[in-house]
Amino acid sequence: MASFLQINSLTKSVGDRILFQNVTLGIYEGDKIGLIAKNGMGKTTLLRCLAGIETPDSGDIVYRNDLKVSYLEQTPDLPGDLTVLESAFIHESPATKAVKEYEMAVISGNQEQMMCAMQKMDSADAWSYEDRLKQLLTQFRITDLMQKVSTLSGGQKKRLALARVILDEPEFLILDEPTNHLDIDSIEWLEAYLKRSRMTLLLVTHDRYFLDRICNKIIEIDRTSLYSYDGNYDYYMRHRAERIEAMSVELAKVKNTLRKEQEWMNRQPQARAGKARFRINSFYDLKDRSRIDLSEKNVALDVKSTYIGSKIFEAEHISKRFGDKIILDDFNYVFSRYEKLGIIGQNGVGKSTFIKLLQGLIPPDSGQWNVGETVKFGYYSQEGIMFDESKKVIDAITDLAEDITYNDGVHIAPMQFLQRFLFSPADQQKYIYKLSGGERARLHLASVLMRSPNFLILDEPTNDLDIVTLGILEEYLSEFKGCVIVISHDRFFLDTIVDHLFVFEGNGVVKDFPGSYSDYREWKSENKEEKPVNKEPKTEKKKTERVQKLTFKEKKELEEVSAKLDDLNREKAELEAAFNSGEQIDDIAAKAIRYDEVKAELDELEMRWLELSEKEG
């Protein structure tokens, strides 16, 4: 295998804390590597060093000459004054320039510009490039090419950045949390794409199925060192335990030998004056090795729920819509004690609205919720913590409660409670605006659990939590003596926690599936209807030989086609602007159907216009 890069004795610190020290690693063609570590241990920093954004304290990173590398940041920084089309390309090339000019010509409707742009598309062989661009952006729910990047949400910017790096077709692709802000369908599409791709990968993700199905190597940052495992995530989990056990045995031997050497060192100096100097050096080396701390500092999720009665909630004829968009339509359900429910569906179908309706945060249009008297909700929202950013961590929690009643009436101070969520006394003095994503997630979780709820509602809880903390949260929820509703795109998390699913299919349709997410995917695959394919093969857009001049009838047809193209392009642009405005849309289903019709008509008419215009030329 060809070597793509070599990392030699790399060290990086933040302040007085060492993230990784003297690490050495080789990455080779065909490697698909998952990088794992707890939050704050240097995963993103290592990726940024490899991408050339940050500089290590010492050591070398040597890439193969002319290696094409792309990097997806966890929070992409895209120029806000550019359009989606302008920012879609990382590198300028004849093909990308031709695509930009062609799309601008299509939007303007100027026939001369379009003719010139088509010729450039032909000479740059850019038609397949343009098709791929639109396919990727559509896959990631981005349709308005002329929308300004500054108007995109954080999730849309992440999806646009992901489309950019895939479109660039690098030899070596570095991805930092690529599944954040993607729904399950998009994650599974990306998973399949990367699995069959020949690109070499280095990625950070908390999605364990994603790691397991894509990666052939796992690298872990642990106690400033790098440990490599030649296998997928499941292989790593098995062999990591063996490594920790072997290290524990070795540490016990070191400490036993150190005790004996300590006795020798404690003797009078005269007694060891003639001893070999190497034995004294060996003693100090043993002393350093004995200081290794193999204890795991993890979040302590041991907060018990308060008592919950047999009546949880009943939904009676609940309906909710926003304009023509139906969220629930005469929804009825009786929730049982200790039930654990997962909610899935594409973005925008009303999953978050459903749990806000349940809690009374949004009123239904009709129907009612009958919630039991003993129910005590704990809500982990997708929006995250709503604390004053200028406050310190300890002050924000103290504002909620100066005394926390913990597990069967035990009273503890907020400072003690925060330490169970890995906030040291020093960390508790941090201002909230300085917290990392993982720290914010842990603080949010602490603020939810400090009230000892018996009905947990978790909206995308897996974002920004590391794999270790996710495993602890899964174990906690599995044994939680209360009720749980989880909205998540993390398939492993759903499989571990829930006993059934609400599948939101849109237009108010909610199906209750009795099983895990993997059960649902298997059932869906087995019951998928085979739809007949009647599509005619798409005519390849290519340069054609010039033939005779247009007949009178063909000239008339060209005028009609040109006028129709102008009308359809205007209608398409108006529909895309409406879809991306974020405002309430009347008749959204009808508009979506019309949008597909317009695109199909445009494809057909553009091909006919090209044929006629080349004849005219």
Image (tube, rainbow, N blue to C red):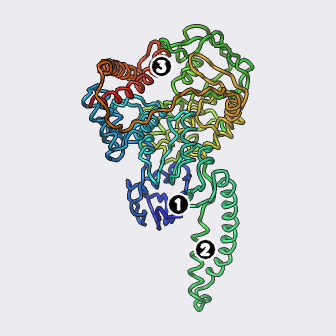
The reply to whether discs 2 and 3 touch (Cβ–Cβ < 8 Å) is no
Q: Residue furthest left?
A: 112
Query: What residue is rendered at 53% in x and 18% in y?
Result: 361
Name the image quarter holding residue 302.
Answer: top right
Task: Report crowding for label 2: few under 14, some 14 to 19, many 20 or more residues within 10 A (C-alpha).
Answer: some
* Amino acid carrying mark 2 in the image: Leu
Viewer-nearest of labels 1 and 2? 1
* Amino acid carrying mark 3 in the image: Ala
**Between discs 1 and 3, the one toward the N terminus:** 1
| Place of residue 252 in the rendered image (x, y in percent of width and height, measured from the top left) | 69, 67
Mark sitting on residue 592: 3
In-front residue for pair 356/412: 356
* Amino acid carrying mark 1 in the image: Thr
Mark sitting on residue 224: 1
Name the image quarter holding residue 600.
Answer: top left
| Place of residue 257 in the rendered image (x, y in percent of width and height, measured from the top left) | 68, 75
Query: What residue is rendered at 66% in x and 71% in y?
Result: 254
- The secondary element bearing badge 1 is classed as loop
Query: What residue is rendered at 34% in x and 42% in y?
Result: 96
* In the displayed structure image, the side of residue 552 where residue 489 appears, left or right: right
Task: Report crowding for label 1: few under 14, some 14 to 19, many 20 or more residues within 10 A (C-alpha).
Answer: some
In-front residue for pair 382/563: 563
| Place of residue 23 in the rendered image (x, y in percent of width and height, measured from the top left) | 50, 64
**Location of mark 2 (residue):** 286
Viewer-nearest of labels 1 and 3? 3
Mark sitting on residue 537: none
